[in-house]
Image (cartoon, rainbow, N blue to C red):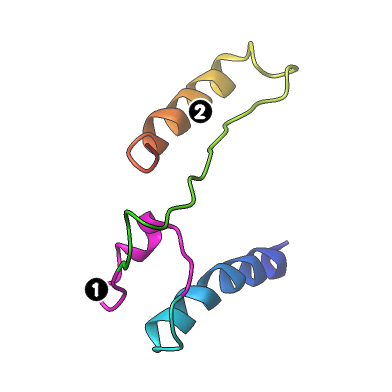
Amino acid sequence: MAKLALAATMERQRPVASDRSGAGIGVCQAAIASRDEAIVRVLPKQFSLPLETWITMHEDPRNSPRCRVTFDALVEGLQGHVS
């Protein structure tokens, strides 16, 4: 499981590293790119790819107080990162 998580993390970072190294114009989530001063957003009004964000839960645990608290915390925490 840890190997899969590491691989997924590395895959997400590869495009950002490519953009940072000056490989050209790349596509990245604005929230991720804004954390790196070396990446400059270009053509923000001419080019944008909206990213829908969904938070879901299987119906079996949805009435569990522990799951509800966790779910609500995820929703609250993510609201600052999506518009």
Q: Dividing the picture into quarters, in which one does residue 36 lie?
A: bottom left
Mark sitting earlier along the chain (2/1): 1
Q: Secondary structure at mark 2?
A: helix
Residue type at numbered disc 2: Thr
**Residue 52: % across, % down:** 53, 39
Q: Residue 19: where, in percent of width, then height? A: 43, 80
Drawn side of residue 33 relative to residue 66, left or right: left
Image point (52%, 26%), residue name: 71
Q: Residue at x 55, y 14 (%)?
A: 65
Residue type at tag 1: Glu
Q: Crowdedness of circle 1 by 10 Å Cα count: few (<14), some, many (20+)?
A: few
Q: In the image, is residue 33 above or below residue 81?
A: below
Check residue 73 for magenta coloring.
Answer: no
The residue lying at 62 percent from left, 15 percent from top is 64
Given contact means CB atoms under 8 Å apart, are the residues at marks 2 and 1 in contact? Answer: no
Q: Quadrant of residue 38?
A: bottom left
Q: Is residue 22 above or below residue 66?
A: below
**Extreme-front residue of the structure:** 46
Is 27 inside the magenta-drawn segment? yes
Front one among 22 and 71: 22
Q: Is residue 23 above or below residue 73?
A: below
Cα–Cα span, label 2 and label 1: 33 Å
| Location of the N terminus (image quadrant) | bottom right
Q: Which residues are magenta?
A: 26-40
Instruction: Name the residue beneath numbered marker 1.
Output: 37
From the top left corner, tell me how far across and down residue 18 is, in percent.
Answer: 48, 83
Query: Which residue is the site of mark 2?
Result: 70
